[in-house]
Image (spheres, grey):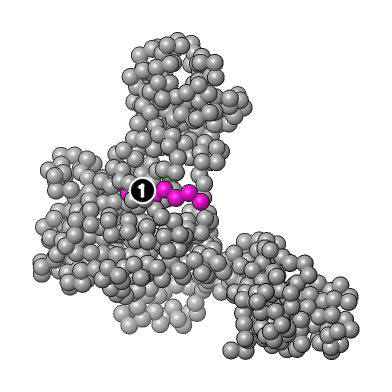
Amino acid sequence: MLRTHTCGELRIGDVNKEITLTGWVQRQRDKGSLLWIDLRDRYGVTQLFLEEGKSEASLIQLARTMGREYVIKITGIVAERLSKNDKMPTGDIEVKLTSLEILNTSKTPPFTIEDQTDGGEDLRMKYRYLDLRRTTVREGLQLRHKMAQQTRLYLDSLDFIEVETPVLIKSTPEGARDFVVPSRMNPGEFYALPQSPQTFKQLLMVSGFDRYYQIVKCFRDEDLRADRQPEFTQIDCEMAFITQEDILKTFEGLIRHLFKSVKGIDMPSVPHMTYDDAMKYYGSDKPDTRFEMKFVELNDVAKGKGFVVFDDAELVVGICAKGCASYTRKQLDELTEFVKKPQIGAKGMIYLRCEANGTYKSSVDKFYDEIELSRWAQKFNADAGDLILVLSGEKEKTRKALGELRLHLANQLGLRDKNKFAPLWVVDFPLLEYLPAGQAGNEEMGLPAGQAGRWHAMHHPFTSPKPEDMGLLDSDPGKVRANAYDMVLNGTEIGGGSIRIHDRATQQLMFSKLGFSPEEAKKQFGFLMEAFEYGAPPHGGIAFGFDRLCSLFGGADSIRDFIAFPKNNAGRDTMIDTPSTISQEQLKELSIDVKIK
Ligand code: ASP
């Protein structure tokens, strides 16, 4: 190495040593008689200094020619600092320069490369390689590396083997559009990039691999919502000869191992909640359980008292905000405005204040007397000083809206602490969900575009129904539960999977329920159904969203800082400037007959 030490390494015990460092000039302070330089590398920052009269004049002169981000190599003597900086690991020492070599110059960078930068998102993305020099961004990637290493360590210890599956494949329906790649050698034909290695990992189970994993890139051509990436990484896993309980135990183990090894947190065992309960008590299939504020249904105490809004509603349901009875009119109006936003969709909100003096004050006092209101309060176990907020209407919509209000309120009350972690298994998802015409995405499934609404696999078509619910498949498909599960962390889905169908007849039945003709099913998934006829073992698995998991462990909102070279919200990489056009010759070679702009 060109250096003897890194810029994060020197301590008080190194005083008087002669050392050599390499790195980037983060900044210089020139006080005339004294010149300080902060030298940065991946490991930290070390302060260097030159002193007029004591250091060689030519050295000082050379140092004064340097700008930010110059790459240098220095030799010097470690000295104890007069004014120490306890915020820096190297803050007790500085290095008195005895030689300086400029290894490369640098243009002035377009933004300051420090923790607090003046660079906006766009600029930082265009010069991502400079952004990556910043400690916060670099630490995100270091965390990611550690998470990946620990994942491999854990899975390897349980005899999982990492197998690479192909990237040029045929479409797998995971509910999004495929990215496609034209095949030059097969004119008019296309590969698809995998939305996940789903069918391959199932085939590996048929092959007898028994325990597979892969930290793998997946691709989904979705309309980019905030913080989605067209290419993302999964920890993808599959096991054979297991029950659902085995999978939940194994992967709860993974998450607990990651918390322990990466963050030093002893995570208690992960609770289970059924999908039905999640919807009923939190209005979401990914409840944030860092705080309580569970829904309480009020139909029995609120209906039949002459208040039409409640009388006409399928569901009257509320939450209790502890200690919030002192909310002002303005604060309550703001909450009402929030639930009335089109994306939330409630028509209005009723409140009940449990006043400190034991009386009740509500926005529907006309219809309910004190005794009736006290019954509401009892249902919530509300104390004096609490505030109850109630929504009503059609069941599903009202639950969803109240779920949003719950999160909004929790944000306001600071209940969503980034340093607190509440993982949860949500189990027993419905097998199917009905998508009305227009949302059915028929074309993506290779079904006729004009077809009416249809049943859609909530997880994916390879998920097995619960055997005890099979009888409902014809009579009441929406009621059939699946052996499917999600792991939720702090209100975010971090992983999901299922026990799979492993026989041809059930898989075929499933495709027909989803609206595939036998020919279509055979054309798209004949290989899988055929494999099931050669001794397919019972199997199941899960995939975790690795980018999101890293961002949650890092306490960040965005996944971008945990991806070395992410795409922006329009799916563009502005640094390499892509997607981009290709030449007419390339198009011709690929047998794609498009005129470029
Ligand atoms: N392939 C599924 C997904 O990407 C995960 C699984 O079922 O294992 O969500």
Relative height, residue 209 to residue 588 (above, below)? above
- Magenta-colored span: 419-426
Rendered residue at 47%/27% (across/down): 389
Rendered residue at 22%/51% (across/down): 483
Is 467 magenta? The answer is: no
Residue 238 shows in the view:
yes
> Given the image, on which type of amino acid does mark 1 rest?
Leu
Q: How many marks?
A: 1
Residue 179 shows in the view:
no
Rendered residue at 89%/75% (across/down): 32
- Where residue 225 sits: x, y (%)? 48, 54
Quarter of the N terminus within the rendering: bottom right
503 horizontally vs 68: left or right: left
Residue that label 1 marks: 424
535 horizontally vs 32: left or right: left
Q: Nearer the viewer, residue 326 or 538?
A: 326
- Where residue 87 sits: x, y (%)? 67, 63
Secondary structure at numbered mark 1: strand
Instruction: Establish whether ligand 1 lies closer than 8 Å to the Cβ of label 1.
Output: no
Q: Nearer the viewer, residue 146 or 440?
A: 146
